[in-house]
Image (spheres, rainbow, N blue to C red):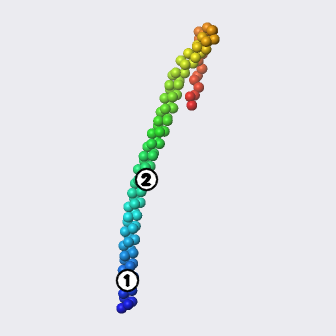
Amino acid sequence: MRQVSIVVSVALLAIIGAAAGYAVGASGGEDLDAARAAAAAAGRSQGAEEGDEQGYDAGFAIGLRKAYRESFPTGYREAYEELFDNAGLASPDRIRIPKPPSPG
């Protein structure tokens, strides 16, 4: 009788242990799924932010080059004429404006 009660006790402990292990594993899986979903959302957000920043930087560089190219000849001519005026010399009739240097 004593052997039967030991066998039943061991079997009962094994069943309880298996049920507890299943419960812990199931909740761990839910935590893992939640962690994966949170990481995916964070990755999308960070990727969008970096993409926006890269897009802004590229747009800014294009705008800077365009504005620089458009304003360089006028600014160059005005600075050249001002230099001659400040020196008390007559400005030349024709001023050769070089190709603007790269702003970057």
- How many residues crowd around disc 1 within 10 Å: few (fewer than 14), some, or many (20 or more)? few
Residue 99's disc is: none
23 up-or-down from 87: above or below: below
Residue 5, image x and y in percent?
36, 87
Mark 2 neighbour class, 10 Å CA radius: few under 14, some 14 to 19, many 20 or more: few
Q: Quadrant of residue 34?
A: bottom left
* Residue that badge 1 annotates: 9
In the rendered image, residue 4, in percent from the top left (x then y), is placed at 37, 88
Q: CA distance from mark 1 to mark 2?
A: 44 Å
Q: Which residue is located at x 38 percent, y 70 percent?
A: 22
Q: Position of residue 58 (x, y in %)?
A: 49, 35
Mark 1 vs mark 2, foreground winner is 1
Q: Secondary structure at mark 1?
A: helix
Residue 39 is tagged as 2
Nearer-the-camera pick, 75 or 102: 75
Q: Residue at x 39, y 82 (%)?
A: 10
Count every numbered label the image shows and give the total: 2
Asked if the residues shown at circle 1 and circle 2 are in contact, with their CB atoms under 8 angstroms apart, the answer is no
Locate residue 29, reporting x and y percent: 40, 63
Q: Is residue 37 above or below residue 19?
A: above
Q: Is residue 95 visible?
A: no
Amino acid under label 2? Answer: Ala
Assign a secondary structure to mark 2: helix
